[in-house]
Image: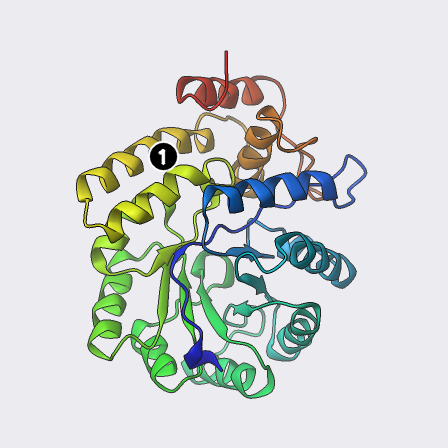
């Protein structure tokens, strides 16, 4: 089935809104999803890094998938992260996501009992053999401590094991090689970049789309950039990327926070300031941004026209 699934365009990794008592905020979730679909995105990726997958119990994962599938209602493909430490747990998540209506699955390499490339390859082959949906490999070595080699990804694509790759490695050389080799091999893989600050370069390299977390805050620019790339209007592609990069400074105007608190915390703070989320609550033990950090993000949104002064 993997070789029949093609995905192109803008596929945001959806941020999950939490109530102050750490429950799923369904009304805010609906506003966010509907806004991105109305903006023209081509798919949505739930339970990725931005989607609190590693913070979520099995019950919460099930709730997020159920609500996501209901809200999307077949308007765009639904990709679901089935990320966990080792193969057997990943298979369990994959079966649940399939049961609940996902269109494709997204999996990383194993990340606790670390092995070599032989084990990583076998991991993806087992997932393909035992799950009934197309599988995307999620290359994010900063979190799983394994870089997926482009030659292995191409091999798995040619063998029909993988439908595509979501590349968040930050290794633009490897991704460029993968794009070139994928094209020469007849394009067996849908290649999506998660490197949201240089999406323009990825498109020029031959990427099939992007998975930009910042599209939760500003989906319209990423959609315009994709359409301009398809039209060969590279001046507009660059202009849109430059504008989006100005907005991306919500990540670096904060102080005293790192990691998830600064990254996804900035998304949630911006979405609350824009009236899309009711709360900027973060999953425990991460704290929501407060005080001067909120005001710094507010200033970026005002300066870039996303929020009135």
Is 12 positioned to the left or the right of 9 in the image? Answer: right
Toward which corner of the image does residue 247 lie, by quadrant?
top left
Whether residue 116 is visible here, answered yes or no, is no
Is 197 positioned to the left or the right of 126 in the image? Answer: left
Toward which corner of the image does residue 101 lie, by quadrant?
bottom right
Where's residue 243, x and y in %?
Answer: 32, 31
How many numbered badges does the structure rendering display? 1
Where's residue 137, x and y in %?
Answer: 46, 70
The residue lying toward the viewer, choosing from 205 and 288, is 205
Residue at image x 27%, y 64%?
A: 174
Whether residue 182 is visible here, answered yes or no, is yes
Structural crowding at the residue carrying mark 1, measured as other residues with C-alpha within 10 Å and reported as few (<14), some (14–19) or many (≥20): many
Decide: is 76 above or below 32.
below
Query: Furthest residue to the top?
Result: 309
Residue at image x 45%, y 55%?
A: 42
The residue lying toward the viewer, choosing from 279 and 78, is 78
Q: Secondary structure at mark 1?
A: helix
Is 150 positioned to the left or the right of 18 in the image? Answer: left
Q: How is the image coloured?
A: rainbow
Query: Furthest residue to the right?
Result: 21
Residue at the disc numbered 1: 244
Residue at image x 37%, y 68%?
A: 190
Where's residue 141, x and y in %?
Answer: 44, 61
Where's residue 43, x and y in %?
Answer: 49, 56
Decide: is 137 above or below 245.
below
């Amino acid at each position: 089935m993997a070789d029949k699934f093609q995905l192109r365009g803008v596929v945001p990794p959806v941020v999950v809104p939490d109530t102050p008592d750490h429950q799923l905020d369904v009304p805010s979730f609906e506003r966010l999803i509907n806004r991105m679909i109305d903006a023209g995105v081509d798919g949505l990726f739930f339970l990725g890094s931005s989607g609190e997958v590693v913070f979520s119990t099995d019950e919460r994962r099930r709730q997020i998938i159920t609500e996501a599938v209901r809200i999307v209602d077949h308007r765009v493909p639904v990709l679901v992260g089935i990320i966990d430490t080792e193969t057997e747990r990943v298979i369990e998540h994959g079966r649940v996501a399939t049961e609940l209506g996902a269109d494709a699955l997204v999996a990383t390499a194993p990340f606790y009992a670390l092995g070599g490339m032989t084990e990583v390859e076998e991991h993806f082959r087992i997932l393909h053999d035992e799950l009934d949906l197309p599988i995307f490999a999620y290359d994010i070595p900063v979190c799983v401590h394994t870089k997926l080699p482009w030659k292995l990804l191409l091999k798995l694509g040619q063998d029909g094991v993988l439908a595509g790759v979501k590349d968040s490695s930050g290794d633009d050389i490897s991704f460029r090689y993968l794009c070139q080799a994928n094209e020469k091999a007849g394009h067996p893989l849908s290649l999506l970049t998660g490197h949201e600050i240089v999406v323009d370069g990825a498109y020029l390299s031959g990427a099939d789309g992007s998975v930009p977390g910042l599209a939760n805050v500003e989906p319209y620019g990423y959609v315009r950039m994709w359409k301009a790339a398809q039209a060969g209007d590279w001046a507009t592609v660059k202009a849109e990327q430059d504008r989006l990069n100005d907005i991306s400074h919500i990540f670096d105007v904060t102080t005293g926070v790192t990691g998830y608190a600064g990254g996804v915390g900035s998304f949630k703070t911006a979405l609350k300031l824009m009236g899309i989320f009711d709360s900027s609550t973060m999953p425990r033990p991460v704290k929501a941004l407060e005080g001067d950090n909120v005001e710094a993000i507010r200033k970026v949104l005002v300066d870039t026209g996303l929020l009135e002064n």
